[in-house]
Amino acid sequence: MPSAAWTAEGRDFVLHDTAGLRRKARTAGHTLEEMSVGSTLDAIRFADCVIVLLDATQAFEKQDLTIADLIAREGRAIVFVANKWDLVENRAGAVGELRNRLDKSLPQVAGAPLIGISALTGEGLERIVPAVLSSYAAWTRRIGTSALNRFLEAALTRHAPPAISGRRVRVRYMTQVKARPPTFALFGNQLKSLPEDYIRYLANGLREAFDIKGTPLRFLMRGGKNPYDP
């Protein structure tokens, strides 16, 4: 797999090219994991940020979504780049449509950078590095515990967790346990019963409140009260 060292905006990068991934993925009867062997899958697992190159004229096909889901499950920062932007007629409408499809189909990386480029004309290429750095910053972001719990209190007030079998799920406390990607521990009662849509509600709120877009977020459910109470 080709790789190259590169410096841009005062930062050093190592670029890995996984060209051919989609062609292989379309061979009959093989899942992405089955065909993504060796260095290609290793590149995703050990990358800081992965750029998913799309065809702007037919973006977010099933294979695009499968690849992006794998990247999110591996916990990598992500940037979407739609090539052939010069062939798109209604660009303003196309941006909104692609954004809606991205956020709906891949809620685990909602808000990730989405850039239109043309490899033919060079349009938009200058926006890739800032988008990568933005996603990397989100991927490595750490948030103070007091700020997290102010966010949590407001989120619970706006939309309380549902009751499960007549007992309300109680989320008492939140802390960040690691970055790369940002991972948060929730403390409370019956947290393993929290519906997926409520966890998504918290994740989307965190993305907006702390500008952590372009990276998957992870949650750990812990029983009991605030472990930092005396």
Image (cartoon, helix red, strand yellow):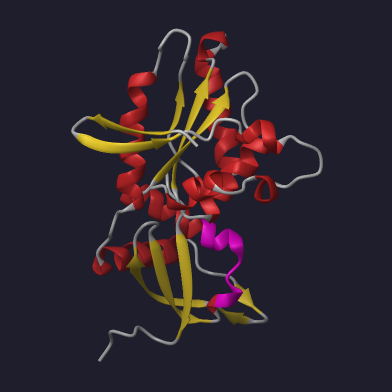
Q: What's the residue at 73%, 34% (across, down)?
A: 26
Q: Nearer the viewer, residue 24 or 159?
A: 24
Say if 223 sits above or below 173 in the image: below
Q: Main secondary structure of the magenta part?
A: helix
Q: What's the residue at 38%, 35% (across, down)?
A: 15
Position of residue 167 in the picture relative to residue 180 (left or right) = right
Rendering quarter of residue 61:
top right
Rendering quarter of residue 227:
bottom left
Q: Which residues are magenta?
A: 192-200
Position of residue 31 in the picture relative to residue 200 (left or right) = right
Q: Quadrant of the C terminus?
A: bottom left
Observer able to see residue 61: no
Q: What's the residue at 46%, 33% (across, down)?
A: 2
- Outermost residue, left direction? 10
Q: What's the residue at 40%, 43% (across, down)?
A: 49
Say if 128 sits above or below 133 in the image: above
Say if 213 sits above or below 82 in the image: below
The spot of residue 119 in percent (x, y) is 47, 14
Position of residue 37 in the picture relative to residue 108 (left or right) = right
The spot of residue 221 in percent (x, y) is 49, 75
The spot of residue 175 in percent (x, y) is 34, 71
